Image: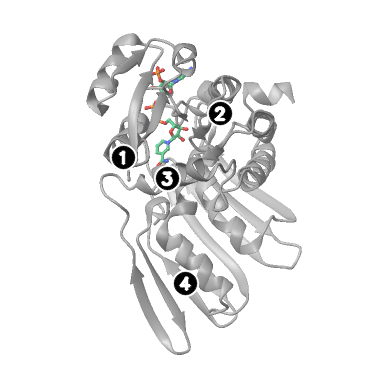
Amino acid sequence: MSAAPKVRWGILGAGGIARTVGADIASSPGSVVAAVASRDAARATFLAGALGADRAYPSYEALVGDPDVDVVYVATTHAQHRDAALLALRAGKPVLVEKPLGINAREGREIRDAAKAGGLLCLEGMWLRLNPTAQALWACVADGEIGKVLAVRADLSHRFDYDPLHRLFDRAVGGGALLDLGVYVAAFALPLIGRPAAVHAIGSMAPTGVDASVVMKWTAATGQIATLTCSSVSEGGAGATVIGTRGWIEVAGPLFRTEAMTVCTADGCRTETRRLPEVNGYGIEVAEVERLLAAGSTDSPAMPLADSLAVLEVLDEARQQLGVRYRADEED
Ligand SMILES: NC(=O)c1ccc[n+]([C@@H]2O[C@H](COP(=O)([O-])OP(=O)(O)OC[C@H]3O[C@@H](n4cnc5c(N)ncnc54)[C@H](OP(=O)(O)O)[C@@H]3O)[C@@H](O)[C@H]2O)c1
């Protein structure tokens, strides 16, 4: 029996994450990086060479027109996700879009609608939702081991050196802690307490006017609460705790690539470890895309588009309370 053909990936944007995830695509037995596009031809050629791709394009338009690309990975800055994803979807290509799906919920809905119109797979690169430890945690909670969930605490903070042109601080490309780091804690809490009935956000701003540190309090209609923190200017432990009526679960940080959790009940505590795959851990995301394409699925059960949109709606609300607006918000 002949092996299934490899999934041929095209990458839009040749920055940091393109190289990191690209290495995991290239090392997957079921995938190959076929092409890389960058606004800068030399950057495209360099990354294509590093990832073993035989085509490098000096524009995103050229890549999405390549008939020998099966799926497009959008690896651009936040404010450019929408245009890049729409470009690919309208060219008939399924997409894996880096987190967050769009800069706001309206952009997320535009991307979802284009995917739906084309009958194409669209997945946000929220790899935490595919993480084996996080999946074991949600299963443990669903099994009732810690009773009914009362509260969730989660942090994803990491100190970046302040530079007004760094994408974490540059408003023009969708900078801000919430969109970069808060998106993870929101995607983590959502399956545990559902969509919040109320969101309260406080925070401090970077000199560029984007959020640098944020505390979000979510309250569910059933009374469950989540305290979610993120910061691009400090370290905060980056772990999580899920508190239930009969026990609790501690998730080892950094949350976005956790590999261990400790479950504690009246019977004692046990620690479970699940390693992420080599090379950089993003193989779980690559495998999910391979699986969904093979099955002809357009939405991932682990990270459905409805959840990507729910997260964006909550982040929109939090940003509104903080007074952080992007150019795309003016179109709303
Ligand atoms: N999943 C994860 O663990 C993880 C980790 C880090 C980042 N990310 C996500 O990955 C995405 C990119 O982050 P990164 O760290 O790779 O950023 P980066 O190194 O700054 O690269 C971003 C790329 O975006 C492209 N781009 C398109 N339009 C742009 C514009 N107007 N200004 C600046 N860049 C533009 C550029 O590609 P060309 O110029 O080459 O076309 C640039 O290289 C973000 O969505 C981020 O949230 C995810």
Q: Earlier in the sequence, mark 2 or mark 3?
A: 2
Does the numbered disc 3 mark a residue whose Cβ is under 8 Å from ligand 1? Answer: yes
From the viewer's perspective, is the residue at label 3 or at label 4 nearer?
3
Specify the label residue 285 is tagged with: 3
The image quadrant that residue 272 belongs to is bottom left
Q: Residue at x 62, y 46 (%)?
A: 311
Position of 331 relative to 8 (above/below): above
Q: Label 4: which residue? A: 249
Q: Pick the quarter of the image with the C terminus.
A: top right
Residue 306: give x, y in percent of width and height: 66, 46
Q: Label 1: which residue? A: 24
Q: Earlier in the sequence, mark 3 or mark 4?
A: 4
Specify the label residue 209 is tagged with: 2
Q: Residue at x 57, y 58 (%)?
A: 189
Q: Amino acid at mark 4?
A: Ile
Specify the label residue 309 is tagged with: none
For the residue carrying disc 3, how many other residues have a C-alpha within 10 Å: few (<14), some (14-19), or many (20+)? many
